[in-house]
Image: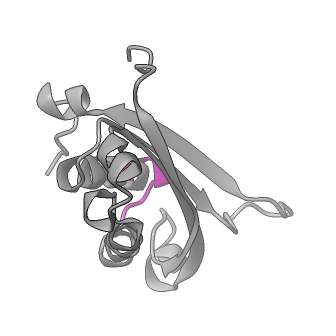
Amino acid sequence: MAALSTHLDRMDLVGIEVLAKHGVLQTEKETDQPFLVDATLWGNFEQAQRDDDLTAALDYSLLHERIRHTVLTTSFELIEALAGHLCRVILTEFPIEEVSVTVTKVHPPIAGFKGSAAVTFRRGRQWLETGAGVENS
C-alpha cells in the first residue's frame, strides 16, 4: 500500500469493548468472549476544524455503534477476517480515505497463556475500488 498522504487528518476511537462469538473452537462460537476494537480513520476533517461545526465532523458515536453492531452480529473463525470485514464496513459507510482496525481477543484459548492476541489491518479506499475488499461468500 502506498504511503499515507501528509494532508490527511486522523481520528482514533480506542477501546471499544464487545462481548461476542468469534473463533475456531465450538465453545468460542457458542459463548460470548471479550474483544477490544481500536479504529483509526484518516480523511479530510478540515471543514469541521475550520467551522467548528458538529454536522461537518466525523460522528464517532455512530462509528462506535457501527463497530459494536458489526462485531455482535457477525461470526468469524479468525480475528483477521473480522478485522478485514470491519475495514470494509467503515470504508463503505464513512467519508474517509483510510482506516486501521485492531481486533484484540482478550482471552485467546492458549493453555497457560495469560496475554491477549491481536491483529491490525490498515486499508484504503483503493482496496475497495480494486475489488480486493470483496469478501468470499
> Would residue 48 be visible to someone looking at this image?
yes
- 106 lies left or right of 6: right
> Would residue 101 be visible to someone looking at this image?
no
The quadrant of the rendering that contains the N terminus is top left
Please give the range of residues in magenta: 76-81
Q: Nearer the viewer, residue 34 or 98?
A: 98
Q: Position of residue 85 (x, y in %)?
A: 31, 52
Q: Quadrant of residue 82?
A: bottom left
- 113 lies left or right of 73: right
Q: Position of residue 52 (x, y in %)?
A: 38, 58
Q: Is residue 25 magenta?
A: no
- 133 lies left or right of 62: left
What residue is shown at x 83% (from left), y 60% (from top)? 113
Q: Nearer the viewer, residue 101 or 83?
A: 101
What residue is shown at x 61% (from left), y 63% (from top)? 105
Q: Position of residue 81 (x, y in %)?
A: 38, 50
What residue is shown at x 40% (from left), y 74% (from top)? 68
Measured along the vertical axis of the image, is residue 68 above or below residue 136? below
Measured along the vertical axis of the image, is residue 109 above or below residue 45? below
Q: Quadrant of residue 56?
A: bottom left
Measured along the vertical axis of the image, is residue 109 above or below residue 97? below
Q: Nearer the viewer, residue 95 or 105?
A: 95
Q: From this viewpoint, which residue is outermost toward the bottom? A: 31
- 116 lies left or right of 79: right
